[in-house]
């Protein structure tokens, strides 16, 4: 099982958030649980190639 970090907040009655690795792709839900399900779906779409040209974050070792 993989764990990914996400950022979230409540605005009025909506829960909004995004995956830390993909901050330009926001989603929302009527509850935190619904938001988390939306984020799972979004993660699958972003990492499976369904959405083209997705920017990624990587680590670079500098000697």
Image (cartoon, rainbow, N blue to C red):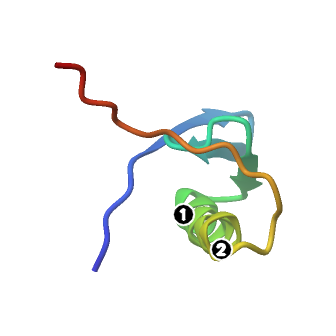
First in sequence, mark 2 or 1: give its number.
Answer: 1
Number of callouts: 2
- Camera-side residue: 49 or 37? 49
Rendered residue at 31%/71% (across/down): 2
Seen in the picture, residue 15 relative to 62 is either above or below; the reply is below
For the residue labelled by badge 2, is the local secondary structure a helix, a strand or a loop? helix
- Camera-side residue: 5 or 30? 5
Q: Residue 17: x, y in percent?
A: 62, 43
Number of the front mark, 2 or 1: 2
- Camera-side residue: 39 or 50? 50
Rendered residue at 60%/62% (across/down): 39
Are discs 2 and 1 less than 8 Å apart at CB?
Answer: no
- Camera-side residue: 55 or 45? 55
Q: Residue 21: x, y in percent?
A: 51, 43
Mark 2 crowd level (few <14, some 14–19, many ≥20, 10 Å Cα): few
Q: Residue 32: x, y in percent?
A: 54, 57
The quarter of the rendered structure image containing the C terminus is: top left
Residue at mark 1? 36
For the residue labelled by badge 1, is the local secondary structure a helix, a strand or a loop? helix
Rendered residue at 62%/67% (across/down): 34
Q: Residue 28: x, y in percent?
A: 73, 52
Residue at mark 2? 41
Mark 1 crowd level (few <14, some 14–19, many ≥20, 10 Å Cα): many
Q: Is residue 21 left or right of residue 58?
A: right
The quarter of the rendered structure image containing the N terminus is: bottom left
Seen in the picture, residue 7 relative to 47 is either above or below; the reply is above
Question: Which of the labelled discs sits on residue 26, or is there none?
Answer: none
Q: Alpha-carbon distance for marks 2 and 1?
A: 9 Å
């Amino acid at each position: 099982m993989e764990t990914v970090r996400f950022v979230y907040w409540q605005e009025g009655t909506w829960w909004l958030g995004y995956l830390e690795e993909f901050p330009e792709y926001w989603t929302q839900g009527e509850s935190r649980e619904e938001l988390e399900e939306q984020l799972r779906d979004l993660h699958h779409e972003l990492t499976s190639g369904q959405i083209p040209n997705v920017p990624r974050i990587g680590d670079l070792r500098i000697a």
